[in-house]
Image (cartoon, rainbow, N blue to C red):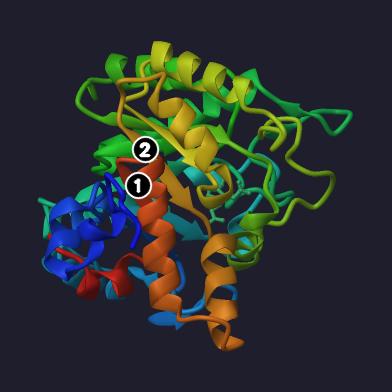
Amino acid sequence: MLTLPLRMRRNRKLDALRKLLAETHLKKADLIAPLFVTEENSGSRPISSIPGISCYSIDTLTPVAKALHKDGIQAVILFPIIHKKYKDEQGSRAYQVDGIIPKALKLLKKEIPSLCLISDIALDPYTTHGHDGLVGASLEILNDPTVAILGKIAICHAEAGADLVAPSDMMDGRIGYIRKQLDLNGFTNTGILAYSIKYASCFYSPFRAALQSHPAFGNKKTYQMDPANAQEAILEAELDEKEGADILMVKPASNYLDIIAKLKNHTTRPICAYQVSGEYGMILAAHEKGLFDADDALYESLLSIKRAGADIIITYAAKRMLSLLDS
Ligand code: PBG
């Protein structure tokens, strides 16, 4: 028999003990559910590239959001699926008040006032070229003119009822500009969830398939971050913090747990992580192949994201996780 001063397994012997001693807890209120909305009056239809997720027309949206909220979800983030006929080079549909996102925000704020509404701010769902910014003469993505448009979109969404606007474009200086525009227009209580650390990742592919927003030329590496970089991530977050971000985001999540952990040591702001479409899709695909159980894997990956330091998580698994979680 070994004489050990400490036997680690003593604290693991009972389910009750393991529950008492768990250092990390995943709760329903940690999860933000993405909701896709379409201008078409087609009811709801499944999104083939993101299994288990659907796109909703305006008349089918409220019951879905109501049910999520009733079951413990506190926030949804809205994404538009825009018909080709509404896309142009400038993405001008993005800030039209009769567009699908302002309509959806207005409706949901009226029908479910206690639900936190987040709207993604970027041009890519609305542009024919699929980039997050305006395109210059030599096909470069223009920073400052894009930021001016992002300000317009933010005001339009704030006016429609967004509690948080979430710029996902990665242009420089957009957080400060949006904060200023919101304040000047009286929206001092509209928060900014900044996609501060957003990497140029292949894991967005299923989302782009859903929006038909794959870049028509080039890639997003001149504005989204190089996955090789970690120091730079902290600088991105610091800048957004100084410019007035209320919540900082790291995206994608699972391959960037080191970044989440590093950010946790550098900021007192809340941290949001985005488990993106490709991360979710990999787990469901592995389940389909019989490699492991999707719910077990989703739970473990979301718990790991929290353990790394995320306070809240945007995940396509929000709904299916609810039955496994406490409030
Ligand atoms: C748009 C945007 C993207 C995602 C969220 N907002 C795509 C992109 O940057 O190309 C990806 C989300 C996901 O993959 O789940 N700027």
Q: Nearer the viewer, residue 256 or 146?
A: 256
Residue ID at (31%, 49%)? 4
| Left or right: 201 in relation to 151 | right
Q: Which residue is mark 2?
A: 309
Residue at image location 30% in from the left, 14% down from the top: 184
For the view shown, which residue lies furthest in the front direction?
1
The circle drawn on residue 306 is 1
Q: Nearer the viewer, residue 309 or 117?
A: 309
Q: Look at the numbered disc 1 and give the secondary structure of its residue.
A: helix
Residue that sits furthest to the right in the current view: 138
| Residue drawn at the location 58% of the way across and 52% of the way down | 125
Residue 190 falls left or right of residue 239: left
Q: Is residue 173 above or below residue 221?
A: above
Left or right: 271 with respect to 224? Answer: left
- Mark 2 element type: loop
| Residue type, mark 2 in image | Gly
Task: Confirm or deny contact between disc 2 and disc 1 (CB under 8 A).
Answer: yes
From the viewer's side, name the closer residue of 223 and 201: 201
Dot 1 amino acid type: Lys
Q: Is mark 2 within 8 Å of ligand 1?
A: no
| Residue 163: x %, y % from top left | 24, 39
Q: Is 126 placed above or below 283 here?
A: above
| Residue 167: percent from left, percent from top | 47, 35
Q: Nearer the viewer, residue 30 or 137?
A: 30
Neighbour tally class for label 1: few under 14, some 14-19, many 20 plus, Cα within 10 Å = many
Q: In the image, residue 47 lies at what x, y percent?
A: 52, 76
